Amino acid sequence: MEGCHPRRGLNFNDNMADNWRRFKQLFEIYLIASGNEAKSSEVKVAILLNAAGEEAVEVFNTFNLSAEDRKDFDKVVNHFEKFATPKRNVVVERFIFNQRCQEEGETFDVFAMALKKLVKSCEISPIQLSVTELFWELAMQVYRKECYESRI
């Protein structure tokens, strides 16, 4: 596809893990849309580095890869993945999730999307999430009852 261009620049500031995830997703879309998905591994590495920008090339140069592995697209992507995705402290991630409140003027849809993003890093299984929801629903019922009774 002639008019298809890759997203320029991988941002290593702020939330590097999210920036990498988005960049990788958009890059994979670009490879398919541009017809470059079937190209050789070496060509895809070159396209990736070109699209990611100078800072990414500097990071790439720090990877401990053999000359052969520097041409292996999957290995290069895997190294970027490891670099951009630090080990998570699940306790801290859950704390951040539990502290997130709806901000003044924030729509519920935006708030719900923020919670969905945060819960992904909490490693909470669907069963744990269901139990947590039940707990909070019961806690809110008790709180509402106490508020109601204190008004009487």
Image (cartoon, rainbow, N blue to C red):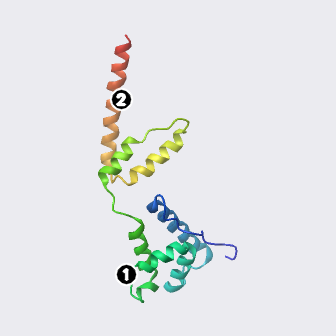
User: Whole-percent x and y of residue 77?
Assistant: 44, 75
> Residue 116 at x, y = what percent?
44, 49
Q: Residue at x 38, y 70 (%)?
A: 82
Q: Where's residue 144, x and y in %?
A: 37, 23
Q: Are marks 1 and 2 in contact (CB under 8 Å)?
A: no
Residue at image x 30%, y 46%? Answer: 128
As shown in the figure, which amino acid type bears the numbered disc 1?
Answer: Asn
| Quarter holding residue 9 | bottom right
Question: Relative to residue 98, is residue 51 drawn left or right?
Answer: right
Up-down relation of residue 128 to residue 44 (above or below) = above
The kind of residue tagged 2 is Met
Circle 1: element type: loop
| For marks 1 and 2 on the same chain, the one whose residue lies earlier in the sequence | 1
**Residue count near mark 1 (Cα–Cα under 10 Å), binned few <14, some 14–19, many ≥20:** few
Looking at the figure, which quarter contains the C terminus? Answer: top left
Along the line of sight, the residue nearer the viewer: 83 or 1: 83
Residue highlighted by disc 2:
140
Determine whether the residue tagged by mark 2 lies in a helix, strand or loop: helix
Please tell me how crowded label 2 is: few (under 14), some (14-19), or many (20+) other residues with Cα within 10 Å. few
Indicate which disc residue 104 carries. none
Residue, disc 1? 64
User: What residue is at 47 percent from the left and 64 percent from the top?
Assistant: 21
Residue 123 vertical position relative to residue 26 in the rendered view, above or below = above
